[in-house]
Amino acid sequence: MRLLARPEPGRPLQPHDVDELDTLRAEGHLIWLDVAGVDAAMLDELGARFGFAESAIEDVLDVEQLPKYDDHGDHLFVVLHGLTAEGDRVDTHEVDCFIAPKVFVTVHAERVVGIDWLWSAVQKHAHLAEHDADELFGQLAEVVGRRYFNVANAIEARIDSLAAAALDADPSVLGEIQVLRREEATVRQMLRPQLLALGELRVRNRTLIGEEAVHLLDDAYDVHHSVVEALATTRGLLSDTLDTYRGASADIQSKATTLLAVYSAVLLPLTLITGWYGMNVAHLPAADRRNSWWVVTAIMALIAAVSMAVFVKIDLIRLPRDRADRLIGGLASVAKAPVKPFTMLRTPPSAADGARVVGKHRTAPPRQRRNR
């Protein structure tokens, strides 16, 4: 366990020995107690010391809880999930928070990068010295949410790197897509209930959550919502990458089938000719002439050339073409293009056309009678 305390707003939180906890609370200090590790006896003692609900202590000791919050009257119990890694896999772990007047307790089984950052920041930065317990929680919720941005950005970067491999129909793309889908699902299944819990907490409880804490929770909610939307986009990009891989694979197989079909179609008449003249019988036409071999070979070459020309003509074989005039580029040129001139449908009245304005409607000038 580690302890931060502050006697009054405006002064930074300072580390203290845990044995001073009761004395600091009696003197009215703001307390932030961070507990790393889940021990039943220790948590029961802390619950009795702070007056936390037994059901909340049971939830801390229970197997992984989904993000939620419980209002116990004089204190709040909130379950968040921070980002961590288990080997080469992205994972989340539970962060249990107790919020009471001048008391903020965090309990977690593993190291939480967001808690470490905020623990150091409240001792250094003056603008965080005004924070109360509820505001510390709001700041922690935002920091935890921003950590998930790293996952969303990393998945998008991996998808960009897979695009070229998918176009080449690289078989390793399938394994990469499955890994990214698993990572995205792991993060999303915790982010959605955490988003809902923060959304309810910022609008329903105004006894223990002050106005400044509500603003911080609004920021935390926006961060979580942005990550959820980014992951939804990522899921669509993964599906598009998989479709690209399947299309490229089908295209390669189609080309191979076409090549074999063309090869067989070209060789078929040549095989027929060589089979005909390869028969071991007498009196074949022109078999006894001196230049018959050259004539038959020329006929076979002509048949092969004509067959290839026919396949090219019907577009079964595609020759390389100059596509310099049809290169596909990005949309940067559109963004840099000047604004096109346009005509306003409503023009201001002018004295030249003799128009007059009645109220908000513009009327045409009166017609002049012609002299006949």
Image (spheres, helix red, strand yellow):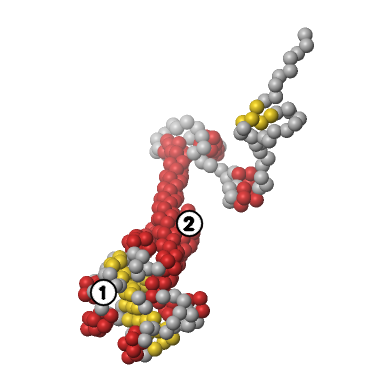
Can you say whether 289 is above or below 16 in the image? Answer: above
Residue 2, visible in the rendered structure? no
Q: Position of 92 compared to 316: left or right? A: left
Label placed on residue 163: 2
Can you say whether 253 is above or below 35 in the image? Answer: above
Task: Compare marks 1 and 2 and give the one earlier in the sequence.
Answer: 1
Q: Nearer the viewer, residue 285 or 360?
A: 360
Identify which residue is drawn at 48% across, 80% down.
10
Identify which residue is drawn at 37% across, 71% down.
82
Label 1–label 2 contact, CB within 8 A:
no
Identify which residue is drawn at 75% across, 13% down.
370
Determine which residue is flagged by label 1: 60
Q: Quadrant of the C terminus?
A: top right
Residue 72, visible in the rendered structure? yes
Identify which residue is drawn at 70% across, 28% down.
355
Q: Nearer the viewer, residue 327 or 336?
A: 336
Q: Quadrant of the N terminus?
A: bottom left
* Snapshot quadrant of residue 210: bottom left
- Residue pushed farthest front? 359
* Snapshot quadrant of residue 193: bottom left
Secondary structure beneath dot 2 equals helix
Can you say whether 344 is above or below 244 in the image? Answer: above
Secondary structure beneath dot 1 equals helix
Name the residue type under label 2. Answer: Ala
In percent of width and height, residue 221 lies at 41, 62
Name the residue type under label 1. Answer: Val
> Callout 2 environment at 10 Å: few (<14), some (14 to 19), or many (20+)?
some
Q: Nearer the viewer, residue 249 or 4?
A: 4
Give the mark count.
Answer: 2
Distance (Cα) linking label 1 and label 2: 43 Å
